[in-house]
Amino acid sequence: MKHILVLILFVIFSASTQAKDNTIFSPVSDLFSAVSNFDHEKMRAAVDDSFLLLEHGEVWTIDDFVNVVKPADYIRTNYFSVINSRVEGDVAFINYWNKANFKNTEKSADIYWLESVVVSKVGDKWLLSQMHSTRLPQGESPKGVTFTKQ
């Protein structure tokens, strides 16, 4: 009986930990879904007022990011592989691989980034506060990484 109780508590704890990880990653997923759909309003909704993106050697605000996301003739599909995450109160730190497939009628290409984010709880919602993004050289992919489609 004691072993069954321990097993039940383990399953409940594991499920709540996984749910927390999914919740803290939601603003990342939401942001890139909005980017894929060229939805500037939803991009802004995924970040807090102090958001900064450190993008391949440049510092961008959400306005800068929104300004480069323009409707185009391709479909962007997002894939992620979370390396690790840590929650400290109302702040979470997440490190992950990001893969985007860009496809149109003529070609398809994958681009990879190694990224980290700081996510802050604002009210009852997690929002992106900071993102650091390093793009891998074209044609290179991370070794041994398994991606999950968004």
Image (cartoon, grey):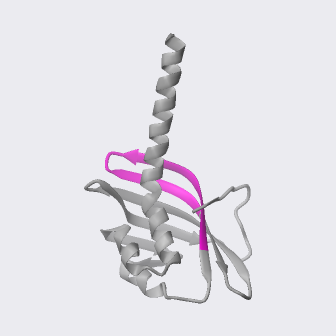
Position of residue 114 relative to residue 36, above or below, is above
Q: Going 42% across and 77% down the picture, which residue do you hit?
A: 59
Observer-nearest of 134 and 79: 79
Q: Residue at x 41, y 59 (%)?
A: 118
Task: Based on the picture, tell me whether residue 23 belongs to the magenta stretch.
Answer: no
Q: Position of residue 52 (x, y in %)?
A: 38, 72
44 vs 69: above or below: above
Q: Quadrant of the C terminus?
A: bottom right
> Most prominent secondary structure in the magenta stretch?
strand
Q: Which residue is rendered at x = 50% and y = 19% of the image?
A: 6
- Vertical position of residue 71 compared to residue 12: above or below: below
Residue lying at 46% horizontally and 32% vertically, measured from the top left: 13
Left-right relation of 100 to 6: right
Residue 39 picture quarter: bottom left
> Is 90 on the left-hand or right-hand side of 15?
left
The total number of labels drawn is 0
Q: Which of 147/34 is in front?
A: 34
User: In the rendering, at what x and y percent does residue 64 appear?
Assistant: 40, 83
- Mark yes or no: residue 61 visible: no
Q: Pick the residue in front: 4 or 100.
A: 4
- Residue 86 x/y as whole percent: 45, 47
Looking at this view, name the residue that lies furthest to the top: 1
**Magenta stretch?**
77-97
- Asked whether residue 69 is in view, the answer is yes
Residue 32 appears at what percent x and percent y? 50, 70
